[in-house]
Image: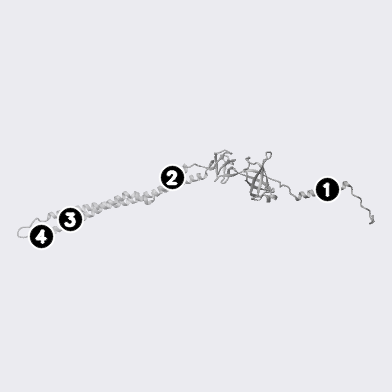
Amino acid sequence: MGWGMERPPRPRPAVTLALCGAALLTGTAALALLVPGPPSPAFGTLHAAEDLVRAPRGGRVVRWLVEPGTSVRPETPLVELEDPGRIAELAAADAAVAAAEESLAATERAAKLDLAWRRAAVRRDLHTVRTEAADLLRDRFDAALQAAAEGDALPDGSPRGGVPARTVSLRTRTAAAAAAAANAAEVLEARLALCDLRERELLDLLEELPETVSAAAGVPAAAAALDAANAEREALAAAPATLTLHAPGHGRVGRFAAAPGALADAGEPLTAVRDDARPFVAAQVPTGRLSRFAAGADVTLAFGEGDRRDGYRGRVVSVGPEAGDGLATVRILPTGPLWPDLPEGAVCEVRPAE
């Protein structure tokens, strides 16, 4: 050649073809990496929203009033629980009745002692008044007798020729004595009237004394307290000794967490009422793909495996925390057409909506 160099040998056709094929495969692979295909689906299971029925307080399950799977409406009776609160209330009511009985008995004893003392005092006063009245009656009788005697002793007339001075003096003294005796009798009569009045007052007081002393000692109030305690005890005894729990809404009753005779703690779930009209899907999504399944994101769903049903839509409403297996639970509610009527736990594919 003109440059003093030999021409390189021409490549063989087979080698050239192999190199071109390798380059083509490499470019295709690179293109596949640069252009992503459709995202792989996440998988979830179909569930129905449920309302838990919890024991409001600890107690023993007496009996279930429905069977699992029963369709119920709000306020349908579900289960009866032994009511330990009612037992405690009855015990407290019994103690209140006993305390009220003891209080009434003590009050009545105190009133009885007070009444006896007051009756004795009134009877002493009554005896004194009656003794005084008897003395006054005697004195009045004596005064009246003296007045009558002095009146009879007065001279009827005077002899002719004048009245001797001695006779006049005797007449005057006799008249004065008669007047004094009559006056004393009147005073004694007035004192007797006062004694009679005092005696009637004491007799009335003696008759009213039991009621007065009873009220002052608090016997009526203690009796009223006992009546109230007995009424409350009777009302509690007449009320049912069990507590009935009712369905919180429409749905189907789930499995029972406690059999009859089992103890349930306060707040423990006993069953759940599942509402098929409120379905949702719980999907397990790798944490690396959660950005496509954020709350508010729209998704498409395909239910079933052999008999596939697709074209359904939903929306992410919540994203749970990441679990130890690198997955997070995403809760999806329906949008658009109603989801198919499938059993609890039916599997579905979930993809981000395009």
Identify the residue at image location x=40%, y=48%: 224
Q: Is residue 140 visible?
A: yes
Identify the residue under disc 3. Answer: 182
Observer-side mark, 4 or 3, equals 3
Disc 2 residue crowd, few under 14, some 14–19, many 20+, Cα 10 Å = some
Of tags 2 and 1, the one toward the viewer is 1
Q: Amino acid at mark 2?
A: Ala
Answer with mark 2 or mark 3, whichever residue precedes in sequence.
3
Q: How far separated are the C-alphas under marks 4 and 3?
A: 21 Å
Q: At x 33% / y 51%, what residue is drawn?
A: 118
Which callout, 1 or 3, points to the residue nearer the camera? 1
Q: Which mark is residue 171?
A: none
Dot 4 or dot 2, earlier in sequence:
4
- Amino acid type for the residue under numbered disc 3: Ala
In what element is the residue under mark 2? Answer: helix
Q: Position of residue 335 (x, y in %)?
A: 62, 46
